[in-house]
């Protein structure tokens, strides 16, 4: 819930301040929360920190996706979105490796997993600082300055268009929410039922395969394919 609501907030901030620095702030915020998760003493404290973690996570995903995709040719965005989605699987695999080899060998136990993740997030923030701002954003900002538009006006336009969109396409918005609810429910069912198997490899290959076919088939035809295949494999 925190992830979803904060994607809108950080989307507005990215239109005002660019893709670079909001993403750096997000990564630092995530690093601090992950570091704090390693010091909690109760489940309630842990739950509170992980809820706040959703704030940073919501911003990171949206900003990273826009930065990666908006600078690519339109023809390449389908497969690139699949490659980007594979970051989830790689992250799960990396966490599993850390939990397997590091956690049992240090006195801190499971806390070391979150401290390591904090370091990785800070490293990612440092890398993003060294990389330039999105060229697409810079061109769009320069065009707005020439037209005499300000960032506050842009935010007002965004909120107005969002309101009109919700009025006109409210049914489609409900469908999208239900679709993602079903997707995430299926994913976590799949992970729970496959804890002893190489899930990350299959998730990665699945994302890559669907991204390859996305540019050669209708998106509506693609939606039921992974769902049907997933239900079949869950029964095995």
Image (cartoon, rainbow, N blue to C red):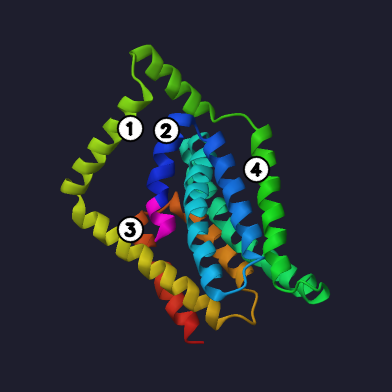
Q: Residue at x 38, y 12 (%)?
A: 146
**Element marked by disc 3:** helix
**Element marked by disc 1:** helix
Residue 57: horizontal and vertical position, in percent? 51, 54
Q: Residue furthest right?
A: 105
**Up/down of 128 relative to 60, above or below:** above
Q: Is residue 103 in sight in this rendering? A: yes
Q: Which residue is drawn at 48% across and 82% down?
A: 234
**Whether label 4 touches label 3, CB < 8 Å:** no
Q: Which residue lies furthest to the front in this view?
A: 41
Return the residue at label 4. 125
Give the mark nearest the N terminus, 1 or 4.
4
Q: Quadrant of residue 9?
A: top left
Give the mark nearest the N terminus, 4 or 3.
4
Q: Distance between the residues labelled 2 and 1?
A: 8 Å
**Up/down of 66 relative to 54, above or below:** above
Q: Which residue is drawn at 34% across and 14% down?
A: 147
Return the residue at label 3. 220
**Whether label 1 touches label 4, CB < 8 Å:** no
Return the residue at label 1. 155
**Element marked by disc 4:** helix
**Whether label 2 touches label 1, CB < 8 Å:** yes
Q: Quadrant of the N terminus?
A: bottom left
Q: Is residue 76 in sight in this rendering? A: no
Q: What stretch is highlighted in magenta?
A: 1-5
Q: Residues within 10 Å of mark 2 (few under 14, many from 20)?
A: some
Q: Is residue 212 in the magenta section?
A: no
Residue 215: horizontal and vertical position, in percent? 44, 49
Q: Distance between the residues labelled 4 and 3?
A: 36 Å
Q: Distance between the residues labelled 2 and 3?
A: 30 Å
């Amino acid at each position: 819930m925190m992830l979803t609501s904060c994607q809108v907030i950080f989307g507005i901030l990215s239109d005002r301040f660019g893709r670079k620095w909001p993403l750096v702030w997000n990564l630092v915020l995530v690093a601090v929360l992950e570091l704090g998760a390693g010091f909690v003493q109760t489940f309630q404290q842990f739950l509170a920190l992980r809820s706040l973690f959703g704030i940073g996570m919501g911003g990171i995903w949206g900003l990273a996706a826009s930065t990666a995709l908006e600078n690519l040719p339109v023809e390449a965005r389908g497969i690139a979105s699949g490659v980007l989605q594979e970051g989830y699987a790689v992250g799960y695999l990396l966490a599993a490796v850390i939990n397997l080899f590091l956690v049992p060998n240090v006195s801190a136990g499971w806390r070391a997993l979150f401290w390591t993740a904090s370091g990785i997030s800070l490293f990612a923030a440092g890398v993003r600082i060294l990389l330039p701002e999105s060229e697409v954003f810079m061109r769009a900002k320069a065009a707005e300055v020439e037209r005499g538009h300000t960032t506050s006006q842009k935010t007002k336009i965004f909120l107005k268009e969002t309101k009109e969109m919700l009025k006109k396409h409210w049914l489609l918005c409900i469908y999208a929410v239900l679709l993602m609810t079903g997707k995430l429910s299926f994913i976590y069912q799949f992970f729970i039922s496959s804890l002893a198997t190489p899930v990350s490899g299959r998730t990665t290959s699945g994302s890559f395969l669907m991204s390859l076919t996305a540019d050669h088939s209708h998106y509506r035809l693609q939606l039921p394919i992974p769902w049907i295949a997933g239900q079949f494999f869950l029964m095995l």
